Amino acid sequence: MRTENLAKIAVAFSGVAWGLFWIPLRGLNGAGIDAFWAFITFNATPAIILLPLFLARWRQQRAGGIWLFAIGLAMGLTQFFYSLSLLHTEIVRAMILFYFNPVWATIMARVFLGEAITPIRWLAIAVAFSGMFIILGIDQGFPWPRNKGDWAAVVAGLAWASSIVLLRHHQDQKPLDLFLQNFMCTGVLLLLLLAVTGTGNAPPLGLVLNQLWWVLPFIFLIAMPGVYWSMWAVPLLAPAIVGVLYMTEISAAAISSALWSGEPFGLREILGITLITVAAVLESVRDLWRERRLARN
């Protein structure tokens, strides 16, 4: 299998991992930790775990230069603002506004990388958007940003598009160092948030520690691998197609919430997931068809 196709699979699976992130947040909340501190707990834990490895690779981190830090900061801002948007606006609005990032990434790649915008790529974006709107619903009209949570989702989408373009442009950066930068920058942003908001209403430490028996396996088996796959695969793919592939998050969230939370799952969800899946494979199918055509000739 071609490396590019492996990268597409890795990005799609990374999107699936992100689609399961609601599980620990809701689980922590159900254990008595309010939404804000559930967000802090889940995002700070990987940073604390990885800090020794980050310090051990400090020389490699410095060798990565300003661009390694810039990529890490963009990814940290993505995770930070997207999580905040989920706290301050409806999940549906946050996901729709965030997932305009394939459009931002396509435009940025054209402007900064000179990448052509092919008709098949626009088609993939259009099909993916159709699936997203069907799953999430736009019965009350298009969700123009109207509160701080909505704007946080927009900022997160722009930050992720910037991350994708930076990763594509600086392919010499090592996936492990990018992986570490992602979590360290998120940790620093959390510290800044706590400096502004204070630590009032913080849950008892014992309550948090009692949840680690299930939070840590989720972090090690789903969260960390999902981020690492992204760091390896994203630089190998066009920014626009990365944004489309990441929409597997929406499908994963829809299926997992139906299985474990009893949320609705019917014809609308099936149709939306089908469209997102079709969008994710459109470009790959075209490439395979071209390869076979060339091989026959």
Image: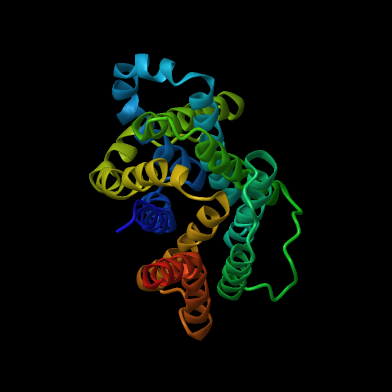
Considering depth in this image, is 51 or 171 the residue closer to the camera? 171
Extreme-front residue of the structure? 297
Residue 284, image x, y percentages: 45, 65
Rendering coords of residue 151 (x, y %): 70, 47
Res 89 visible: no
* Residue 159, horizontal then vertical, whole percent: 60, 41
Q: Is residue 235 above or below residue 132?
A: above
Q: Residue at x 31, y 46 (%)?
A: 225
Q: Residue 136 location in percent, x, y? A: 58, 70
21 relative to 290, above or below: above
Q: Quadrant of the C terminus?
A: bottom left
Is 291 situated left or right of 128 in this image? left
Q: Quadrant of the N terminus?
A: bottom left
| Residue at image point 46% right, 68% down | 290
Q: Quadrant of residue 33?
A: top left
Identified at 29% across, 37% down, the residue is 209
- The residue closer to the viewer here, 229 or 98, is 229
User: How many labels, in total?
Assistant: 0
Residue 100 visible in the shown view: yes
37 lies above or below 99: above
Q: Nearer the viewer, residue 66 or 14?
A: 66
